[in-house]
Image (cartoon, grey):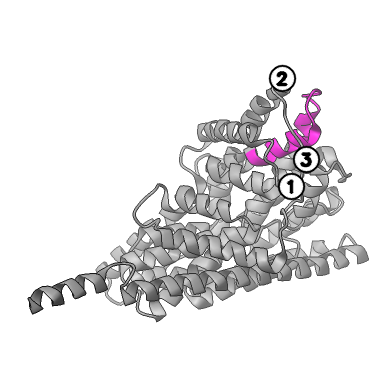
Amino acid sequence: MRDEQTSRMHRLREHDLLSPRQWRRRILLWTGAVGVGLAAIFFAEASAWVYARFVQLLAVSPYWPLLVTPVVFALLSWSTRGMFMATRGSGIPQAIAALKVDDPGFRGRLLSVPVAAGKMILTLVALAAGASVGREGPTVHVGAGLLYSLGRRFGFADPQAATRFILAGGAAGIAAAFNTPLAGVVFAIEEMAGAFETRMSGVVLTAVILSGVVSLGVMGEYAYFGKIDSALPLSRSWLAILLCGIVCGLAGGLFARLILLEGAPPLARIAAVRARWPVLFAAACGFVLALLGLASAGNVYGTGYDQARAILENAPVMPLDAFGALKFCANTVSYWAGIPGGIFSPALAVGAGIGHNLAALVPGAQPSAVVLLGMAAYLAGVTQAPLTSAVISMELTDNREMVIPILAVCLLARAASSVILRVPVYKVLATRLVDELERARSRAESSPTARVEVPGDRT
């Protein structure tokens, strides 16, 4: 009888709702999610402050970036070597690669606290030089790194537990960066986990929502681009869905293909030049960006948030008709430089510019509605994550009238993008990281004195 009672008490203690270990894990995840939310708020405010200093520099003379931007790009390329190589690029591929590989050493080199801190600081430096990069991808990297390090510090280093912490941290990063909790949940499912799996537990989802709530509580209830009251009634104006889906989807796929620097001989030659002279190549990218800045009256620098919002609100952005193409080029050379920085916000800006151009071809539709479709479609074309792109676009503009058109245009854009790039860009970049780990292991096995290094996102 006593043995039966002991067994029953043991089973009760092992139950998820009563297990001390499970409650420790929950509390750590939730505490970490609050930390990610606060880090995202700091990152957002710091990004705005440093970019404002660059705008002040532009006000002194629009020619200053011809000197400053190449020098800073070269310094960033030089500094993101060795232990900080993992800070390069968006940061989302690093989080995805860490989910794929259970190796603690690999995960630690991609997601350590120094790497997370370096990612934030170096992205701020890039924005201070006018780089056409975003902070949302880096926030995902920072969030994944913070929660992974927190989990390991308190004894949750086994592969399954570490996976939950990485997934929760990355998704919490998106939720807090855009102030969009629902987008964080969808991003975790579609982009990072790839499907509904056992690791997408209720605790992870709660952590994502909590991070968004922290952002909401500190920053207030706001939409990233303000409330956009636009609609697309069922009529000939729905031609905009077809137009934006195909054009923006193809453009997004082209951008993804370009930043991968693989395939066609011209891209392979550019990749070879960058591999041989990375610092000089980064400086050259900075100089080209400065030239694009002169051609656009300074509008292609930074995240593109102000320009996208202005286009949505039908405010003048000069040169408006060429903004989408110029921002596309600015995003490409900034990413080619191999410096830290994401592509979410800059992609939305490109989509807004293309949407403005396409609105003239659909006279029966509200221009702001077509611009919103262009933003959603281009982001879906770049990431090939239609659900995430649709939810982000709706939450960023607090628009519920456009739910069906946005979902339709994102699905169409994803199909169009796959014609140019069959595998989503983040998956390709994450696979590269995993493949380079395997090659490093092979070299280490053949030469015991060789050191296994984990490179960052080289694009």
Name the quadrant containing residue 96: bottom left
**Residue 243 in the figure: left or right of residue 24:** right
**Residue 189 in the figure: left or right of residue 131:** left
Q: Which residues are magenta?
A: 356-376
Secondary structure of the magenta portion, mostly? Answer: helix
* Residue sitting at x 79%, y 43%: 312
**Residue 365 in the figure: left or right of residue 87:** right
First in sequence: mark 3 vs mark 1: 3
Label 3: which secondary element: loop
Q: Is residue 190 above or below residue 29?
A: above
Q: Is residue 70 above or below residue 255?
A: below
Task: Identify the amino acid type marked 3.
Answer: Asp
First in sequence: mark 2 vs mark 3: 3
* Residue sitting at x 57%, y 30%: 412
Of the two numbered discs 2 and 1 in the rendering, the one whose residue sits closer to the viewer: 2
Residue extending farthest to the front is 1
* Residue sitting at x 66%, y 58%: 134
Crowdedness of circle 2 by 10 Å Cα count: few (<14), some, many (20+)?
A: few
Q: Spatial distance from mark 2 to mark 1, Cα to Cα?
A: 32 Å
Query: What mark, if any, has residue 327 been given in the picture?
Result: 1
Name the quadrant containing residue 137: bottom right
Crowdedness of circle 3 by 10 Å Cα count: few (<14), some, many (20+)?
A: some
Q: Spatial distance from mark 2 to mark 3, Cα to Cα?
A: 18 Å
Q: Quadrant of the C terminus?
A: bottom right
Crowdedness of circle 1 by 10 Å Cα count: few (<14), some, many (20+)?
A: many
Q: Is residue 136 above or below residue 110?
A: above
Task: Identify the amino acid type marked 2.
Answer: Ser
Task: Identify the amino acid type marked 1.
Answer: Lys
Which residue is the site of mark 3? Answer: 229
Which residue is the site of mark 2? Answer: 235
